[in-house]
Amino acid sequence: MPEVEVLTAPLVVEFPFTRSLGPVQSAFLTGLRERTVLGVRATDGKIMVPPVEYDPVTADELRDLVEVAATGTVTTWAWNPEPRRGQPLDTPFAWVLVRLDGADTAVLHALDATGPDAVTTGMRVRVRWAAERTGAITDIACFEPHESSEEAGQVAPHAGEFTDQVTGIVTPARLDYTYSPGRAQTAYINALAERRTVGERCPSCRKVYVPPRGACPTCGVATTDQVEVGPAGTVTTFCIVNIKARNLDIEVPYVYAHIALDGAGLALHGRIGGIPYDQVRMGLRVEPVWTEGGRYPDHYRPTGEPDADYDTYKELV
Amino acid sequence: MREVAIVAFAQSDHLRTTDELSEVDMVMPVLHQVLAQTGLRTSDIGFTCSGSSDYLAGRAFSFTMTLDGVGAWPPISESHVEMDGAWAMYEAWVKLLTGEVDTALVYSYGKSSPGSVRDVLTRQLDPYYVAPLWPDAVALAALQAQALIDAGETDEPALAGVAVRSRESAAANSHAQVKGSVPQGDYLVRPLRKGDCPPVSDGAVAVILAAGDKARELCERPAWIRGMDHRIEAHSLGVRDLTDSPSTRLAAERAGAFERPVDTAELHAPFTSQEVVLRKALKLGDDVAVNPSGGALAANPLMAAGLLRLGEAAARIHRGESDRALAHATSGPCLQQNLVAVLEGDAQ
């Protein structure tokens, strides 16, 4: 088989996660909006910041909120010379775990420091509040060095109630990929660009897969033998679509069908045009219609041949 | 308890990129190899279980595509975990212990090259307090490394020593990606240098499990699973003592690791500093051969690197190079979740 360069394309997976908050998370994140840091008293009496809804050891429900200081001590750090997208600062900074005064656990965040030589475990820091705060962990813009002595473990009880309590967060997420479909689908897509449909035959059961996926799911072996199928085919089954799809300029109702191209071992799907929707039937013989510059058939239309006999396609329904 | 063993193990070469291979192209040869070692066909296998994560390559339901490589028709008894394949093997082991089946095929794969794995892994973190900050996997490991240095448990030269030993061991592993003499390089996130970090790898692994006499029939020297357990720690990094791994110790205890010394340990430590933590938690002496395969520092196909440890440890027993081996797999940031298995060969 000739060596063909595999296709690649940028793929962006982007999704905003909308999450509701439990009562403790809601109080903590609303508190950050109000420049107040809250912790929760765990079953063993320790103060957890950031606070959690349930005890990490006993799984008890935790609701006993306290206010801690906005100053604290670095418990460990790591210097990040090349900030990445989405991170708290866009200049080199230190990742830090900070135990706030009054808390027994540490919170992860960024520390704005001049360089790694300016950071040590045990150094004193304080919260730098974001100018605009919405009720999110990013309401803490970062930490900054701050000379102060550790306040004795005094914490004040807090009801955790604020006006206009935050009850949910929306976290945008975006991941960038360069996707390659691999050998089999590259060959399929390249052939389609020449208006040919090329499947692959299983060397064991002889079934021809269109589009090919590289392996026969029945036999578990590679399908490497390329077979051109079609261009004409037979409607094996269909449905009538009555709902207009967004961004799709097709009048409803229209017919969407499974089409077994001649020589293919399974049906692919496509729209049927060139015939009133209520005249489409199983066994109808169809052929692809290409549009200028189209990477795949726009739709399929009747060839005018007599309908296929049911026995010729019943295995493909 | 029913005797269950790893009777076959195969892996792909682990590579930085595999554009020409779809995921099934990558997995299928490994499945064929592991079946060929035992003479079994797919239809002879009682249970099939796989591990993978769609986030790595950004391809939804990729595990249904790789199942094509198994030959899953007529329908087979099958399961999948969105985790490292070590946990798929745990599920298969439990299935064998029930007596419901006598053989199992377990495989896993990771194709990280299409994406930016440091960023992808941020999406597994606490979505309320941590993920919005996008702390990448190297940054979190570096926080753990600094905590170890501060505690006097290690220093940068010692970490470099772990890197050197791992890549030297990997020289004898034809499937490994990074081997031989590799410079430590610059800091990625201080105190971790490039050499302290694993490569980004594409790769696949498969094992076959069998019970009792079936195992003896399929393998000259089965690697008997004497115990296996997995444990998890609190998800907030600031709650944990990052210099220790109580979950590893507990899993090892329950797997019977401390009943008798092991001669070999395959540890899933993607970062040099994590080997320091694991050695301590597992009380490994200097006489134990740690990661003779090179470990995850030599090849780190995510979702496969843990099952690779189980497979490599078993292969040492198959070859008669080990009599009692410990295999460990991890998941999550800073060794959050840990699995330990103890494998033994019959007396030689």
Image (cartoon, rainbow, N blue to C red):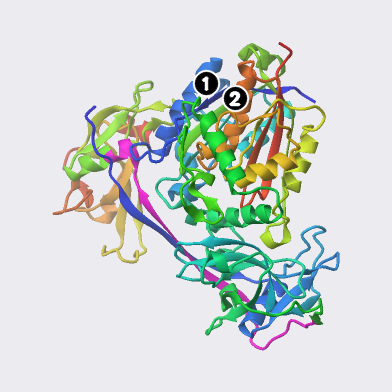
Which residue in the protein does label 2 denote? Answer: B208
As drawn, which residue projects farthest toward the bottom?
A163
Report if residue A158 lies within the magenta region: yes
Q: Nearer the viewer, residue B2 or B249?
A: B249
- Residue contact at pointers 2 and 1, CB within 8 angstroms: yes
Task: From the image, tell me which residue sits under label 1.
Answer: B35
Residue B79: which quarter of the image?
Answer: top right
Left or right: residue A53 compared with residue A183:
right
Residue at 18% across / 49% down in the picture?
A: A289
Of residues B37 and A90, which is closer to you in this image? A90
From where the camera sits, is residue A283 visible? no
State the image coordinates of residue B33 (x, y, percent, origin top left). Answer: 48, 22
Magenta stretch: residue B287 in it? no
Residue segment shown in magenta: A157-186
Q: Residues within 10 Å of mark 1 (few under 14, many from 20)?
A: many
In front of the other: A182 or B182: B182
Q: Which quadrant does the N terminus of chain B fall into? A: top right
Query: Whole-Å distance between the Cαs marked 2 and 1?
Result: 8 Å
**Quarter of the C terminus of chain B within the rendering:** top right
Residue that appears at 74% across and 67% down: A53
Please tell me in which quadrant of the rendered image residue A52 appears.
bottom right
**Residue at image location 46% in from the left, 38% down from the top:** B182
Tag 1: amino acid: Leu
Which badge, 2 or 1, is on the more N-terminal residue? 1
**Numbered disc 1: secondary structure:** helix
Q: Chain of mark 1?
A: B
**Chain letter for mark 2:** B
> Is A104 situated above or below B103?
below
Secondary structure of the residue carrying tag 2 is: strand
Which residue, as the protein is rendered here, is positioned at the far left? A292
